[in-house]
Amino acid sequence: MDGDNIRQDRRKYVDESMEFGTSYEPEVAIRKPKLKVNGAKEIVPTRVTSNPVLQTMMYQQSENQFQEGWDYLLGDHHNVIRKALGQSLIVKAMYDGSVVAKAYCLFRGWGDIEKNHEEAYDLLIKKGNNSNALALQAYFRRNGYGCDPDPIDAIRLFSSAAETRHSWAIAMLAFFYQEDEVIPKDDKRAFRLYRKSANLGYTRAKHNLAEMYWEGRGVLENREEAMRWFREASHQEYDRSKLKLKEIEEEERLRIENELKLKQQQQKKSRGRKATKLGLSSLRSISRGGVEVAAGVGVGAAAGVTAAAEIMAKMVNSLWRAAI
């Protein structure tokens, strides 16, 4: 595989792992419709106040709202995936003052603003040590969004975010250990990181952890534990886990059907052999009786009985060979 294909596959994985889309259909309106946000929902920004204390509270609320939107968007912290709601909450958080939400909306082109990766990256840099900002900085550095790609720096940033128990950043580190490009492949370490992220509630980590249990990569094969994690991710509406469970169910159904057919064939064959042996026994008995009758009658009659006995003997031999 050439370098361009490797980069394309890597970006595809990362995009899938974040479960980012461009726009989703609305679920419910957050407030009375006034401001239409990229067709996703109609929301009303919180009224700006001049009170510093209230401004601080509102800003913190907007950051919390971004986190809530992120959780619905990705299926993080054990939340069910609801992408439309996640997008709407993130856009509202942007209008309420969240810097990270604004950077993310600039990245995706949400909230009636144009995509601008450079501006988005600058905002994330200014945000500093916020865990979501660090994780997104790492994502930008890995893929070269608004900056030069630097996978080593991406690992450093993902690691910093992971120290704050950022479940998505932890899962992204696990992928680095599976990828075998920037750092040496280490399935055992990848397994431990996926398990930590899965316990924090990230759906993709649950799915990847289940696959490692299923295939015995980085851990002893454990199909029962794999099914438990596939089901957990499926309950959070993670499509790949739902599809995997259907595939496993279909494979199990076919296995049971094949075993049943084989058993029926064996039983039929066994019954056929028993019937053949019973027929052989009956024919032998008749043959012996014919000989005995011939001994007690005239020579002419005996010759006829003897001929019949010979025919039956041939039938017996034929059946016996068939039974064998």
Image: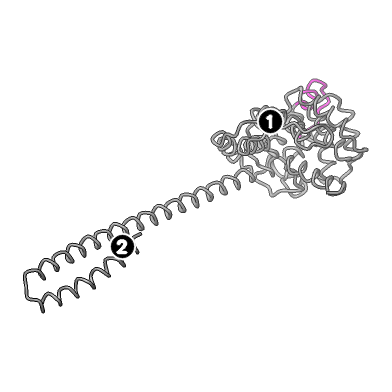
Residue 121 lies, in percent from the top left, at 89, 35
Question: Where is mark 2, residue-wise?
Answer: 320
Q: Which mark is residue 231?
A: none
Question: Where is mark 1, residue-wise?
Answer: 191
Residue 160 lies, in percent from the top left, at 81, 24
Splitting the image into 4 quarters, where does residue 287 fall?
bottom left
Determine the residue located farthest toward the bottom in the rendered image: 300
Tell me if residue 50 is in the magenta stretch: yes
Q: Residue at x 89, y 43 (%)?
A: 116
- Counting every numbered tag in the picture gives 2
Splitting the image into 4 quarters, where does residue 115 fall?
top right
Q: Nearer the viewer, residue 150 or 273?
A: 273
The answer to whether residue 65 of the structure is visible from this angle is no
Highlighted range, magenta: 46-60
Q: Secondary structure at mark 2?
A: helix
Residue 199, compared with residue 319, is above or below; it is above
Dot 1 alpha-carbon crowd within 10 angstroms: few under 14, some 14 to 19, many 20 or more: many
Tell me if residue 279 is in the magenta stretch: no
Residue 95 lies, in percent from the top left, at 80, 36
Label 1 to label 2, Cα distance in Å?
62 Å
* Callout 2 amino acid: Trp
* Callout 1 amino acid: Phe
Q: Residue at x 87, y 46 (%)?
A: 3
- Judged by its main secondary structure, the magenta piece is helix
